[in-house]
Image (cartoon, rainbow, N blue to C red):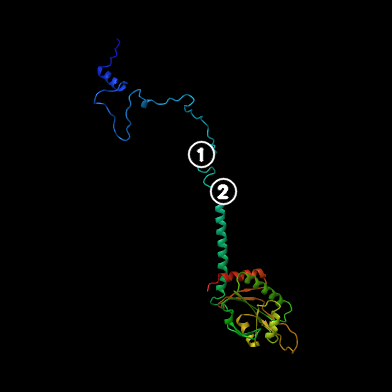
Amino acid sequence: MSRSIPRATPFVGACRNFFFSSSQPTGASRVRSFSTSWARPVASHGSPASRRPVLSAAQSPQPLPLVQRRTKYKTVEEAKSRYRSGPFSWKAGVLFVAAGAGLLWYFEHEKERMKRKRIAEANKGVGRPKVGGPFDLVDQHGKPFTENDLKGRYSLVYFGFSHCPDICPEELDKMARMFDLVEAEQPGKLLPVFVTCDPARDTPEVLGQYLEEFHPRFIGLTGTYEQIKAMCKAYRVYFSTPSKVQPGQDYLVDHSIYFYLMDPQGDFVEALGRQHSPEQGAKVIAEHIRDFKA
């Protein structure tokens, strides 16, 4: 049994005619749209305000072609990861190596510094024989020179005699080289001192002429035999002159071959022997000067 479709009621037809009719409504009861700032007036069907421009086929926007985007990642896992090579990169590796090298250098530097400090402190410790002490001598200009003249800066003290045929000249050349190297790095921080073990022949005039051949800034000290003996004893220096020497007779003096490094307070720091080259000795002296704190 077929079911008939009901026709539109008169009310529906009236509404349709009202909203879609092209004729203007009559009477004073003209329907107006909302007067808000954003509302646009409702135009009747077929009016110029309701007409929209119709674009031709050539003017209508064309859809963009689909282009496949290429990426540097081969898999989805690589695309999701921030780094293709994992959490480490070559920059991180370089930074790690540089930091490790810096720490290694720092620890080695501190290790050497603490070693030098232990040497200096051990030479001042209780129970160790004291090296250095008071003395009263004269320099190559005949002026008095005491232990107080060594204070205020480091001093490098060597004991020898001017008539030495080979060892003393070699050691004084070495002393001049060490002094120049330290002076270039630490100007005015080191005083080179030569003390004679043969006061009978090494007068102030003789010392002055002798030391000029090695370095003009060397300080030469001499005095009486008893004064030299007392200073050698204070510095733990061995020396021996032959007995029963006739006047004018040539002789040799046996003595210790060390450079005694003293700090600005007059305390013994370290002894440099023949095993140290001039460069090695200058390095040791310069490092002690840098480490010193008054």
Tell me what residue is drawn at x 71 percent, y 82 percent: 209
Residue occupying the far left of the picture: 28
Q: Position of residue 166 (x, y in %)?
A: 73, 77
Give the residue pinned by disc 1. Answer: 79
Q: Nearer the viewer, residue 84 or 69?
A: 69
Q: Nearer the viewer, residue 59 or 193?
A: 59
Residue 189 lies, with reference to residue 32, above or below; the image says below
Q: Is residue 252 left or right of residue 58?
A: right
Q: Position of residue 294 (x, y in %)?
A: 52, 74
- N-term mark: 2 or 1: 1
Q: Nearer the viewer, residue 184 or 15?
A: 15
Q: Is residue 18 visible?
A: yes
Tell me what residue is drawn at x 58 percent, y 66 percent: 112
The total number of labels drawn is 2
Give the residue pinned by disc 2. Answer: 90
Amino acid type at image mark 2: Trp
Q: Residues within 10 Å of mark 1 (few under 14, many from 20)?
A: few
